[in-house]
Image (tube, rainbow, N blue to C red):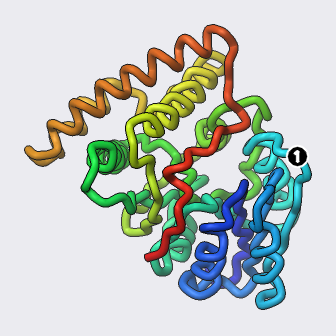
Amino acid sequence: MVGSMKVLIGVCAYNEENNIGNLLQNLITKQDLPKASKFLVVCSGCTDKTPEIVKNFKKVDERIELIIEKDRMGKAHALNKLFAIARGSTDVLVLTNADALPSHRSIMKLLSKLVKSNAGAAFAQPVPLNDFNGLSDRIVHVIWRLHHVISLLQNPKLSGELCAIYAHYLQDIPENVATDEPYIELAIRKHGFDILYVPEAMVYIRCPNNIVDLLKHRKRIWIGHLQIQSTTGFKVSTSSFMNIIRSFSALKPHEIFYAVLGGFLEFVAYSAARFDFSKNVVPYVWEPIKSTKASMST
């Protein structure tokens, strides 16, 4: 039963003073979580007010815990701390980004579906908060729509914007990786379990709102995909050309133009990623994408 589960909500944060308060308020008041839920925020090398904001929330809700890492050593390093704690103390680890906002009761929707399934993890549908004013905004909406369509296929790719994972399937991630989700997904699939997509559970995200930032973001993701494919042979479903072609049939006519432009940008990002990866340039300590760090609320 979901109500009796021990759940740890884990958040990795770096200089998220504009968003961490909104997220914690959301988790406390809008998710109707099991009584045994706890919250753990790992602040890595923060130079802003993020740790202070978390400490203030801890005064209001004693379930909130804070780990401060003096130096920023990459998201995988912070995740491994969360994994170690989750494996020893909880049934399910829920991961959400510090700059994301789950819709009402989305975490409970994930947990409810997970316990009724044969899956090792369940993830929500990421929904961009970007408006439709700029070219990049329209492209990211199409990218995430394609992600949604592909996720409805047989082998969805785990999305880390909001996901719930059985704690005993968690394995430490190599700390020099550019993207963490494929390694989490691979560990679960090696145990013989599926990844469950729960589209009715939504999480709002802010995506890059200019082409330069979008290319940086997509390049980092492609480096991560190339990295895991090179070391393990594992390939995520969203990098499958056939899956992308199949998903195009679900697009509306006015979306095709932006999908084609997005495809060109993906090619540029992929080519740049291949070049950097061939030179062993792996951004495991991410460069923040500035246009995604504005304050957001729903």
Task: Please name the residue shown 81% across and 52% down the image.
Answer: 44
Task: Please name the residue shown 28% across and 49% down the image.
Answer: 134
Amino acid type for the residue under numbered disc 1: Asp
Q: Which of the 4 image quadrants contains residue 255? A: top left
Task: Please name the residue shown 56% across and 70% down the image.
Answer: 111
State the residue in front, 293 or 129: 293
Above or below 50: residue 260 = above
Q: Is residue 69 left or right of residue 147?
A: right
How far across and down, in percent of the image, does residue 70 sit?
A: 91, 52
Residue ID for mark 1: 71
Which image quadrant: the C terminus?
Answer: bottom left
Q: Residue furthest bottom?
A: 60
How far across and down, in percent of the image, does residue 132 sit?
A: 25, 56
Q: Is residue 170 left or right of residue 94?
A: right
Which image quadrant: the N terminus?
Answer: bottom right
How far across and down, in percent of the image, does residue 239 sit?
A: 42, 29
* Residue 191 visible, this angle: no
